[in-house]
Amino acid sequence: MKRPLVFGEVLYDCFPDGREILGGAPFNVAWHLQGLGLNPLLVTGVGRDALGDAILDTMRRWGMDTGAVQRDPQHATGQVRVSLRDGQPSYDIVADQAYDHIGQDLLAGLRPNEFALIYHGSLALRAPTSSDTLDALIASSGLPVFLDLNLRAPWWQRAQLMPLLRRATWVKLNDEELCEVAGLPASRAVHDVDGLVEVAQGLAEECALRWLIVTRGGQGAFVVHPGGVQQGAPIPVDGLVDTVGAGDAFSAVSINGILRGWELEQTLEQALRFAARVCMQRGATSEERTLYAGRASR
């Protein structure tokens, strides 16, 4: 089976109490893909610093390929500074980090015929160096694209979105992001489900998408495809801990289903099921192999 190629940020969430939690949507997706036995290649950048060393050590411990992790001597490993006010967190996604400067020299050794698809989000595209590298990778490889939109204010521009959507084959976003793309109030995500499906169908047709996946948190998900709409019922969470990384878990299983040739209904159900399971643990990733037992080939 050909491998998935994952492009984008790896970073640490840094809390006031000194905790540093490893994450970033592309990293989380690559982590889960490794757990599912798909041997992804993560194309990213980290600094020549202690956090960068820790990321590489963690990836090696999990068995991940570190061959496309660029060590940047001039820019620090990505960080999100988390602050708390009256118990509510706010997030400062620090600018000008190593993942903003992923260079095209990484692409020289890549052999496109090893890979099945390219996964990417949108945060790492906020800076021209990484954005240009992804453009070159997609153009030179001809690989289909799984786009996980992951809009993070203020690091996206509306004018950037439609070109990204039009070159993708599969797109995953949540209901609020769909409203953002369509220029609709976020309240539509809750109060007008039928309208939301209609908007998604229009967007999928306009961009000629194979799948447009819309996740809806505790309300499940639906997928617009050329044959219609596939609804996915929510999976009950037995003991909610947090929802961090649930969307990334969903994306990873969606890619697993695509690469293993699952039917859409099975892929959607298993993606929802794995996302619900991740909500029962602290954080987006886990080194517990049992989390992935039996999930790869269902």
Image (tube, grey):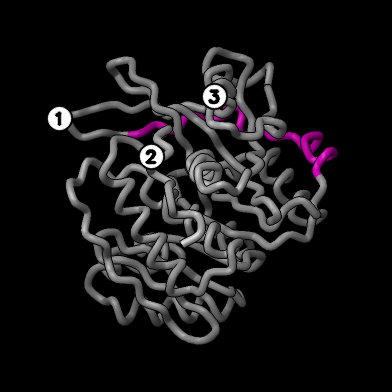
Answer few, some or many: residues within 10 Å of disc 1's Cα (few below 14, many 20 plus, some between 14 and 19).
few
Name the image quarter holding the N terminus: bottom right
Left or right relative to 55: residue 93: left
Q: Quadrant of residue 108?
A: top right
Query: Where are the magenta residues, as a range?
Result: 91-110
x, y (%) of residue 19?
A: 34, 19
Q: Is residue 19 among what the camera can see?
A: yes
Position of residue 217 relative to residue 184, above or below, is above
Q: According to the image, label 1 marks what residue?
A: 86
Q: Residue furthest front?
A: 294
Q: Residue furthest left?
A: 86
Q: Residue at x 57, y 64 (%)?
A: 258
Q: According to the image, label 2 marks what residue?
A: 284
Q: Is residue 84 highlighted in magenta?
A: no
Which circle's residue, 2 or 1, is located before the other in the chain?
1
x, y (%) of residue 271?
A: 41, 60
Q: Amino acid at mark 1?
A: Asp
Q: Amino acid at mark 3?
A: Ile
Position of residue 254 relative to residue 7, above or below, is below
Q: According to the image, label 3 marks what residue?
A: 55
Position of residue 96 relative to residue 256, above or below, is above
Whether label 1 touches label 3, CB < 8 Å = no
Q: Quadrant of residue 287?
A: top left
Q: Residue at x 44, y 70 (%)?
A: 266
Answer few, some or many: residues within 10 Å of disc 2's Cα (few below 14, many 20 plus, some between 14 and 19).
many
Q: Amino acid at mark 2?
A: Ala
Q: Residue furthest top?
A: 50
